[in-house]
Image: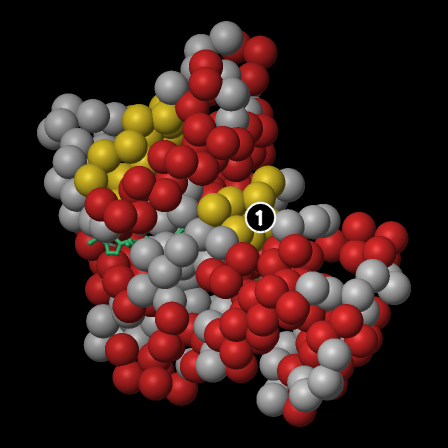
Amino acid sequence: MSKNNSNDWTINKILSWTEFYFKDHSIDSPRLTAQMLLAHSLGIKRLDLYLQYDRPLQKNELSDFKVLIKRRIQNEPAAYIIGEKGFFESNFKVAGDVLIPRPDTETIVEEALKILNIGKDSGSPKTVLELGTGSGAIIVSLAKAAPGHLYFASDISVRALAIAKKNAEKIVPKIISDKICFCAGDWFSSLRKTSRFDLIVSNPPYIPTSDIQTLQPEIKQFEPMLALDGGRDGLACLRSILDGAHRHLVPEGMLLLEMGFDQKEEIRNISNRYPQYQSIEFIRDLAGHNRVVLIKKSID
Ligand SMILES: C[S@@+](CC[C@H](N)C(=O)[O-])C[C@H]1O[C@@H](n2cnc3c(N)ncnc32)[C@H](O)[C@@H]1O
């Protein structure tokens, strides 16, 4: 990017240059990433870049943008640089303390909404608990789409909870965000022994510790280990959740969990050890992988 006169760098020119530079550095979606970072840097919407295609960048605009290009080249995910990520029709604030919500996780939201909409005319609000809420992407999306229910969310990371609360305040009106109760703690530890929920959802860490080094640098260098590391076999958190969930579900309550595509048989085995669960069903994603498990508690 060595032009004598910074005014030579129009939005159009800098986008093309950055796209090629990102391609050269094997950055995913180079054009889109260049647009997202430039729009963020200029404080305008991405589509508005095209209305100002021939506008030359000021010297300070160019140097601010260079800083973002450098961060992305050093593998920092675009979502952390921009500070937000789209998930299930909303934009969630994200920072290094929370996992960047993934499109795959929208399956849990869709399945949870099917459960919440069953008997929606019966008039009784259901109680929903999310374990390991991170940015709040799941619980806030549920509260937005099905506002008539009561929502609880926990995470062991106090910093993640602070971001989840901000997302709730930003994305759902106050009357709804007030109905989401956030609490800090290790899985079920912040709950009263007597607390019971109609639905418990979670996208827990499920990557085996030894696989973490094989992940993309964007993930292993920048996303919180607490959100990724599922212990030696990847199932440590899923085990803890299965062990505790039956104590906090109403009779015939549902447990909905995201899982690794190759964890089906292990999860079935763990679940079968608990007579408190009466059925287990695996839900495939669009690619045909089992990525979500739905477990129903018995009548008691
Ligand atoms: C895979 S992330 C999911 C974040 C968010 N729900 C999502 O789907 O984008 C797992 C979350 O579980 C939290 N977590 C890890 N261990 C935990 C524990 N022992 N108790 C409660 N939360 C935990 C992490 O802090 C992290 O926010």
Residue 265, position in %: x, y? Answer: 38, 68
Query: Residue 46: x, y in percent?
Result: 74, 54
Q: Classify residue 145 by image quadrant.
A: top right
Front-most of residues 224 and 96: 96
- Name the side, left or right, on which 298 lies relative to 166: left
Instruction: Inspect this view and state whether residue 290 appears.
Output: no
Query: What colour scheme was applied to this rendering of the protein?
Result: secondary structure
Location of residue 90 (image quadrant): top right
Residue drawn 52% across and 10% down? 122
Q: Residue at x 46, y 42 (%)?
A: 138
Q: Quadrant of residue 60?
A: bottom right
Q: Is residue 97 visible?
A: yes
Decide if ligand 1 comes within 8 Å of the CB at mark 1. yes
Residue tagged 1: 87
Density class for disc 1 (Cα within 10 Å; few <14, some 14-19, many ≥20) is some
Q: Nearer the viewer, residue 40 or 64?
A: 64
Q: Amino acid at mark 1?
A: Phe
Q: Residue at x 36, y 60 (%)?
A: 96
Looking at the image, the residue that sits furthest to the bottom is: 24
Estimate the x, y position of residue 141 in percent, counting from the top left: 52, 36
In this rendering, is residue 151 above or below 98?
above
Quadrant placement of the C terminus: top left
Q: Position of residue 257 (x, y in %)?
A: 40, 51
Q: Of residues 29 and 196, which is closer to you in this image?
A: 29
- Determine the secondary structure under disc 1: strand
